[in-house]
Amino acid sequence: MENKKILKSGEFLVEETEAKNVFIPEEFNEEQKMIAQTCQDFLETEIYPKLDEIDTGKHEIMVAALKKAGELGLLGIAVPEEYNGFGQNFVTQMLAAETIGAGYSFSVAFMAHSGIGTLPIAYYGNDEQRKKYVSKLATGELIGAYCLTEPNAGSDANSGKTQAKLSEDGKHYIMNGQKMWITNAGFADLQTVFAKIDNDRCLSAFIVERNYPGVVINVDEKKMGIKGSSTAQIFYNDVKVPVENLVGARGEGFRVALTILHMGRIKLGANVLGAAKKAINDSVRYANERKQFGVLISTFGAIKHKLAEQVIKTFAIESAVYRVSSDIDDLIEQNKKSGMDKGRVSIEAISHYAVEAAILKVYSSEVLDFVVDEAVQIYGGMGYSAEMTVEKGYRDSRINRIFEGTNEINRLLVSDTAMKKAMKGEFDLFGIAEKLSANLSNIAEKKNSNENYYAEKKRYIRNFKKVALLAINAATKKFDKKLISEQEVLNNISDIMMEIYIGESTLLRVEKLETLKGNEGVKIYKDMLDVLVFDSAEKVRKSAVDAFSAIEDNVDKLINAVNDLTDVLSVNIKNARRRVADKLIEDNKYKF
């Protein structure tokens, strides 16, 4: 991959990527597989036997589990070795996040601690702060929390009212305010708290220890799901925070918050992947045991349809998760060579991929909701029983569409962020879109006689990209600076972009997989790709028609162009799904 071009965030809309230049899960090395197995063994021995006990919300049970994870080194996978961590690359961090994602409430506490509870200090803190705090967070000696949200500052985080004023002797910041929906609040030893110094326009970030006088932690919230995780309000009443506990520069907190949120969104994509695979495994095992009308329900076409859809959607998000994770690793290496501060090389690379982070957050969380819903349906009445883990998975899943910024906010960010990056000159989006829009006749690429399987699918993806570009051009011309208020249109464009990125990632994975497994070895994966692209074409068409109908009065030409651009050859998706389901049923486990 020496000559691999590192795409800018959102640049996938106007650039093609070669299959040889993407990373796919089938390329995990032995060390990565061992780390994943350690995570899996931990869930099997320490978490699954105690699921009901954990869900009672007793803090000591969760704390004991986190500390045991710390002893095994699982809390420090992303932390540099000099601070008691493993210093693993981003792909490995994502694999660990995926595996732990099958841990229900524990995964929430684990990810909050090892991600947003630890990494703001690791990435933005100074060396003294890292030695004092990060080295203990990595081992589980300290448990971390991230305190950003306030009663009137959720999606609009910078509107928070928590204040910090320098004391007369200049040794402390006196903090007053309130935070809410804080994960790990009930037992965290350390909090990264965001507050405004004096009348600053932007937030600053502070390290606050739980035992500082004036820190008051409320009782845990009663929640729909993730019942074992602690979520509570925290109040700060004249809390004296040492000046040396300011993280980064004054007024840099909003930047810290945003970049950490980008990281959280990407890692959530991996986290829900693990939860989806767990739900699929539960689904197929039940389907292979439950009989109705004298036969196993796994023999029914309607059940096979559900199982196949669970697999196809999960395989697709897995492809996208590791594609962007490897891109981040490449950018980290580039940042290192540029001489960037060692603490920021990683977070700058992670936050660079803001468009892809938002895509993964939205698409993956919605896939998980689909997968767990179908799992409950496959179980039937038993799926509604609290005795079954699918019931727990169903309730736990719902928070993911709210975590790390709601899906409504993130959906808007997909298209808006890509356009803003293009406006800054990071890549040419509008010039290409304008050229396409100037000549709508024969805009769709047509099949040529030498086209093989992958060339055909790539042609479809290129055509889908043209749909997105046409929509962007029409929307920006019509609404200009008022486009941000046309949220329905932005959502239409974002939905098209998500289908493109997920579809292209899956295509590139299958194409590369053929070089490893041969033509016979990828037939089942081609089935998945066939279904995915066929279904995506209709979703792209519908989103585009909705957008153009809201933009233009006379849309016939545009809609005709969209119909041409989303015209894909029909495939027998019923049989393709059945083949996918049959493999799952035979393996009795997700093994794709």
Image (cartoon, grey):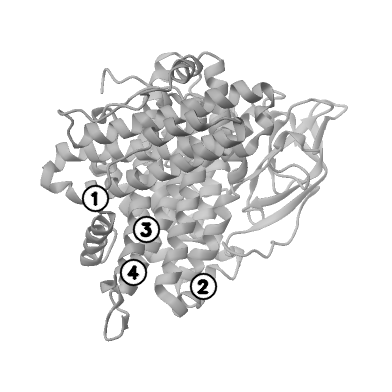
Mark 3 vs mark 1, CA separation in Å: 14 Å
Q: Residues within 10 Å of mark 3 (few under 14, many from 20)?
A: many
- Mark closer to the observer (3, 1): 1
Label whose residue precedes the other's in the sequence (2 or 4): 2
Q: Amino acid at mark 2?
A: Asp
Q: Which numbered disc, 3 or 2, marks the residue that appears first in the sequence? A: 2
Identified by mark 4, the residue type is: Ile
Judging from the image, what secondary structure is the residue with disc 1 in? helix
Query: 433 or 57: nearer the eye?
Result: 433
Q: Earlier in the sequence, mark 1 or mark 4?
A: 4
Mark in front: 4 vs 3:
4
Q: Earlier in the sequence, mark 4 or mark 3?
A: 4
User: In the figure, is residue 513 to the left or right of 140?
Assistant: left
- Three-letter code, disc 1: Asp
Q: Amino acid at mark 3?
A: Gln
| Numbered circle sitting on residue 303 | 4
Q: For the residues carrying marks 2 and 4, which lies nearer the camera in this image? A: 4
Q: Mark 1 and mark 4: span between their CA atoms?
A: 18 Å
Q: Residue 67: percent from the left, percent from the top?
A: 50, 55
